[in-house]
Amino acid sequence: MATATRPPASSRLRRLARRPVEQQREAPTGERCELCGEPLPGEHRHIVDLDSRALMCACRACTVLFDHRAAGGGHFRLVPERRLRIVDLELGEPLWERLRIPVDMAFFFCSSQAERTVAFYPGPMGATESLLDLSAWDELERANPVLAGLEPDVEALLANRSGESRDGWIVPIDDCYELVGSIRSHWSGLSGGSTVWTEIGRFFERLDARAKRVTRGGGEATATTPAGAAGDYAKEE
């Protein structure tokens, strides 16, 4: 069972997700910090409102202010910048089916509000929540101990099984909603069209360039560490 939900991202973040990467990093946006009103550069960090599950754009000063867990009084959490590629993620077809994800891409995070791990998958209407089999998640976590270190509400496991890919990533939650926004804005027709798959490929290429490679046990991956199949993002329209 799946229920369509609006992703916890502001309209500002969705607009940012549609801009070229160079503009995101260098150009001023005309936007302001949603906490203090200061102007924002193109590349900035986000804070999660745990009550509404909304992402708020934050300036550098507010980022420093909220850069430890107690600063938000249990109400706000700064989204971290850690990105890890799990090169040997243990997630076979039977377990994927038990996770009840009807597509080939999803993200999972521990929700303090729901007091459990939740699962979402991207699509043309945004992010859709899927009813997660918690026993399947527990099995996934046991097989991949690195997942036990996910920061609640602000970090997610992003799984990509499209094409020949069998990739797993630990990412900041705003990366997930950047992907959601990109898919939503570039989707066309029933299958998405070629443009959306080009954008998905670019997203994962950028992510790969920024991520540290680790094993499912949490150790640093080496050149001899077995890895999953390389990503193949090209799809026919």
Image (cartoon, rainbow, N blue to C red):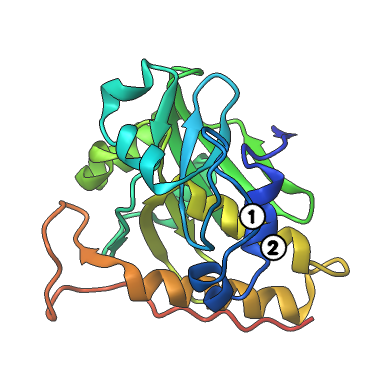
- Could you tell me if the residues under marks 1 and 2 are in contact, i.e. CB atoms within 8 Å? yes
In depth, the one of 161 and 112 nearer the eye is: 112
In the rendered view, would you say 165 is above or below 107? below
Residue 180's tag is: 1
SS for callout 1: helix
Which x, y percent locates residue 178? 58, 57
In the rendered view, would you say 140 is above or below 118? below
Residue 101's tag is: none
Would you call the spot at circle 2 few (<14 residues within 10 Å), some (14-19), or many (20 or more)? many
* Residue placed furthest toward the front: 38
Q: Residue at x 39, y 48 (%)?
A: 60
Residue 183's tag is: 2
Would you call the spot at circle 1 few (<14 residues within 10 Å), some (14-19), or many (20 or more)? many
Query: Quadrant location of the N terminus?
Result: top right
Which x, y percent locates residue 194? 74, 81
Q: Residue at x 15, y 68 (%)?
A: 221
| Count of marks overlaid on the render | 2
Q: Is residue 84 left or right of residue 54?
A: left
